Image (spheres, rainbow, N blue to C red):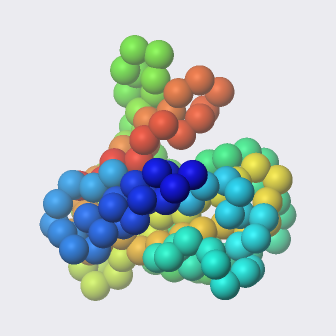
Amino acid sequence: MVKLGVFLVFCLTLAVVHPGMASEYVCPPSDTFHRGDSPDHPAGWPARTREQPAPMDSIQFFDGDPSEEAGLAPQRHIQEGNDEVSVWPLEQVTPTDRPVWLACHAANERTFFARPLPLSVKECRVTYGQKNHVRRIFCE
């Protein structure tokens, strides 16, 4: 668990310190979702609440703050071996002063975590493994 926490802090640091770089994002560990309202939720990932529990572990991109409910759909899907990659081109989605947000949802939880992406992000790719398990979130 400590290694995962250190890795998460490293990824978050890359995204904040080097916003123009390509970054891999890692959603908070699933055990943090049921205690999302507590003050010890993952740094950089404000806890949010949705009306209905998420039907499965998933990620979602939003045009602006998730409270505005402007969810974005992937524009294409690519098969890479046994994995499927969904692609969100973001260059023309929002004005240059309004970030796209990444939200992480856990199955059967109303709490989710979301964070704005750097304004320089032009595209995000999400790799799904078996049973739609999110294996990788990569934005550049």
Name above or below for residue 61 compared with residue 83. Answer: below
Name above or below for residue 78 compared with residue 16. Answer: above
In the rendered image, the residue lying farthest to the top is 81
Compared across the picture, whether 136 is left or right of 59 comes to: left
Compared across the picture, whether 39 is left or right of 16 comes to: right
Tell me residue 30's x, y (percent): 67, 53
Q: Is residue 88 visible?
A: no
- Residue at 57%, 52% (x, y): give it: 1
Q: Nearer the viewer, residue 92 or 84?
A: 84
Question: Which quadrant of the figure has residue 114?
Answer: bottom right
Tell me residue 48's x, y (percent): 67, 76
Q: Is residue 35 visible?
A: yes
- Residue at 42%, 41% (x, y): give it: 136
In the rendered image, the residue lying farthest to the front is 2
- Residue at 35%, 81% (x, y): give it: 98
Compared across the picture, whether 128 is left or right of 12 comes to: right
User: Considering the image in quadrants, where does the C terminus appear?
Assistant: bottom left
Q: Nearer the viewer, residue 69 or 32?
A: 32
Tell me residue 126's x, y (percent): 43, 42
- Total number of numbered labels? 0
Tell me residue 6's x, y (percent): 42, 59
- Residue at 42%, 74% (x, y): give it: 116
Q: Nearer the viewer, residue 24 or 93?
A: 24
Question: Which quadrant of the figure has residue 56?
Answer: top right
